[in-house]
Amino acid sequence: MKNIMKKLIVEQPTEWHRFIAHLLFAMRSTPNVTGYSSFELMFGRRCRPHLSILRELWTGEKRDAETKTTYQYVLDLRQRTEETCKLAQAELNKMQNKNMTYRNQKSKLRVLIPFDKVLVLLPTETSKLISVERSSRSCREEGIS
């Protein structure tokens, strides 16, 4: 890019700043080592250069099926986003169930009866995330688990 900029400045010493947008467009739409241009990697489709758009306007050719209106693009994007959210939610539920099954393998259901002794862990005054044993109390209600 530096070499191209140097050449542009040499050829157009007073007007070089007007060509920067065109230079960037040319660089972003030119395929690189991977065989894809930066534009293709970003937007998932080939870039339509200015001349092809002008040719379509002058000759009256139809647009590609690949090219969409802004409204259609937004609708498709919304639909894809909703589908992705549903898929992510399903995967999240599946992972939560898997983790719950793994973590609850050795757990037991405990039903407390009144006056059973229980250990009470309360947060410290300095941090709500750190729990400390405050006291051992007796259960007051039946059926607490």
Image (cartoon, grey):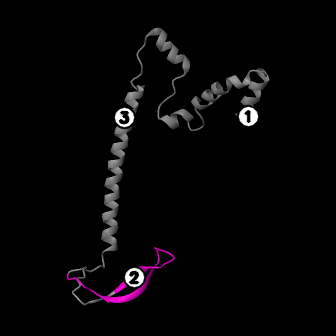
In the image, residue 136 lies in the stretch drawn in magenta: yes
How many marks can you see? 3
CB atoms of marks 3 and 2 within 8 Å = no
Residue type at the position of mark 3 = Asp
Taking depth in this image into account, of 126 and 51 the one nearest to the observer is: 126
Q: Mark 3 or mark 2: which is in front?
A: 2
| Quarter of the view holding residue 102 | bottom left
What span is colored magenta in the figure?
A: 119-142
- Can you tell which mark lies on residue 76? 3
| Quarter of the view holding residue 65 | top left
Taking depth in this image into account, of 70 and 45 the one nearest to the observer is: 70
CB atoms of marks 1 and 2 within 8 Å = no
- Residue 62 in picture, x, y percent from top left: 40, 16
Residue under pointer 2: 121
Q: Secondary structure at mark 3?
A: helix
User: What's the CA distance linking mark 1 and mark 2?
Assistant: 64 Å
Q: Mark 3 or mark 1: which is in front?
A: 3
Residue under pointer 1: 2
Residue at (51, 24) in percent of width and height: 48
- Residue 40 in picture, x, y percent from top left: 51, 34
Residue at (74, 21) in percent of width and height: 15
User: What's the CA distance linking mark 3 and mark 1?
Assistant: 39 Å
- Can you tell which mark lies on residue 130? none
Residue at (34, 67) in percent of width and height: 99
In the image, residue 24 lies in the stretch drawn in magenta: no
